Structure formats: C-alpha cells, structure tokens
Image: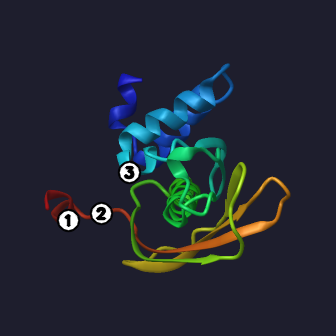
C-alpha cells in the first residue's frame, strides 16, 4: 500500500476498496480506515457495503451512541451518514486530478429512523470546467425500505489543480 501515497485520491480510495472489500471482514476494515481518515464521520461507525464510481451504499446500525432522546437515530447522525455516502460516491467518480469541496448541505427528515439505516447514492459527475457546482443526493431507508431522510450536498468541483494552486 506504500505506492498508494503517490496515487490520485480517487484512485487510492478505489484501490483500497478493491483490495479490502472481497476479504473476510474487509468491508469493515475499509470502513474503519476511512473513519480514521475522517474522524467526525468515523464517530458514527457506519459500514461501507458498496463503492464504485458514482454509486455507494453505507449502513448504520441503530445503537445508543447514535440515538436521541426520542429513541430514534439522531438527526445529525443521519446527516453525517448522508454526507459520507454521497461524498464517497462523488469522490469515487471524480476524474484524475479533480478535487471538490462541499458548499451546502440540506436534509429532509421524513420519519423517525429506527433500526439499521441504509443510505444509497447514485450520481454522475457533470463535465468539469474551472469550477463546477452540482448536487449529490443520498436516500436513507430503514429496514422496511421506507425513506426516513433525503440528504443533498452541493459540491464545487474543480478540474486538475494548476501548479500555482497546489502551492497554496
């Protein structure tokens, strides 16, 4: 994995997924490694189940650490799950050298979230110009397949950074 440090972040992410996910416990290991890289996201201990360019599925187990006073999954744990899922799908779809930053978030809570919650994103990266903005959506469903929340992240993505921008 030492050679991965010189690889584009998108390629690094997908290479790590392809190496780990087929192994027994590999998806869990991948999920925890990503959680260490992104500590706030790692706090919910969500598990990546599917990752491919433009598509991601992540599961969150309902447990005391992510619950609110109403005995349901906390609103911000759901937002964190949506941001994680949509961000992985989008990042995995980026062309080499592109980079992105979230410029806005919104979430619609449809019903109380209880039990295992599964978030799924399908997205397509538009043609990138200097700075391109677009939305990436994640739907969060409970074990009955009912939508509990719809999450939307607005991303600003730039094509390959210039040498001057890389110095900053």
Residue at 20%, 65% (x, y): give it: 165
**Nearest-to-viewer mark from 1 and 3:** 3
Residue at 54%, 66% (x, y): give it: 75
Residue 80 place in picture, x, y as percent: 50, 59
Query: Is residue 39 toward the left or the right of residue 111 in the image?
Result: left
Of 76 and 139, which appears nearest the observer?
Answer: 76
The answer to whether mark 2 and mark 1 are in CB contact below 8 A is yes
Query: Is residue 97 toward the left or the right of residue 153 in the image?
Result: left
**What label does residue 40 carry, if any?**
3
Badge 2 or badge 3: first in the primary sequence: 3
Mark 1 element type: helix
Q: CA distance from mark 1 to mark 3?
A: 27 Å
Residue 74 place in picture, x, y as percent: 54, 61
What residue does disc 1 label? 165
Count residues near mark 3 (Cα–Cα under 10 Å), then give few for <14, some for 14-19, many for 20+. few
Mark 3 element type: helix
Query: Is residue 163 toward the left or the right of residue 154 in the image?
Result: left
Residue at 49%, 41% (x, y): give it: 13
Mark 2 element type: loop
Residue 82 place in picture, x, y as percent: 57, 62
Residue at 54%, 59% (x, y): give it: 68
The answer to whether mark 2 and mark 3 are in CB contact below 8 A is no
Query: Is residue 75 toward the left or the right of residue 103 in the image?
Result: right
**Nearest-to-viewer mark from 2 and 3:** 3
Say if 64 sits above or below 108 in the image: above
Of 18 and 104, which appears nearest the observer?
Answer: 104
Quadrant in the picture for the N terminus: top left
Q: CA distance from mark 2 to mark 3?
A: 27 Å
Q: CA distance from mark 2 to mark 1?
A: 6 Å
Count residues near mark 2 (Cα–Cα under 10 Å), then give few for <14, some for 14-19, many for 20+. few
What residue does disc 2 label? 161
């Amino acid at each position: 994995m030492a050679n991965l440090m010189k690889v584009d972040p998108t390629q690094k992410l997908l290479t790590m997924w392809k190496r780990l996910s087929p192994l027994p416990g590999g998806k869990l290991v991948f999920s925890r490694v990503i959680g260490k890289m992104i500590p706030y996201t790692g706090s919910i201990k969500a598990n990546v189940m599917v990752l491919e360019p433009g598509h991601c599925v992540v599961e969150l187990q309902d447990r005391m650490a992510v619950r609110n006073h109403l005995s349901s999954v906390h609103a911000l744990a759901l937002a964190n799950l949506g941001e994680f899922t949509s961000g992985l799908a989008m990042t995995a779809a980026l062309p080499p050298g592109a980079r992105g930053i979230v410029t806005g978030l919104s979430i619609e809570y449809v019903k109380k979230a209880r039990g295992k919650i599964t978030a799924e994103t399908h997205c397509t990266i538009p043609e990138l110009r200097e700075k391109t903005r677009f939305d990436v959506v994640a739907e969060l469903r409970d074990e009955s397949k009912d939508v509990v929340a719809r999450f939307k992240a607005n991303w600003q993505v730039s094509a390959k950074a210039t040498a001057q921008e890389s110095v900053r």
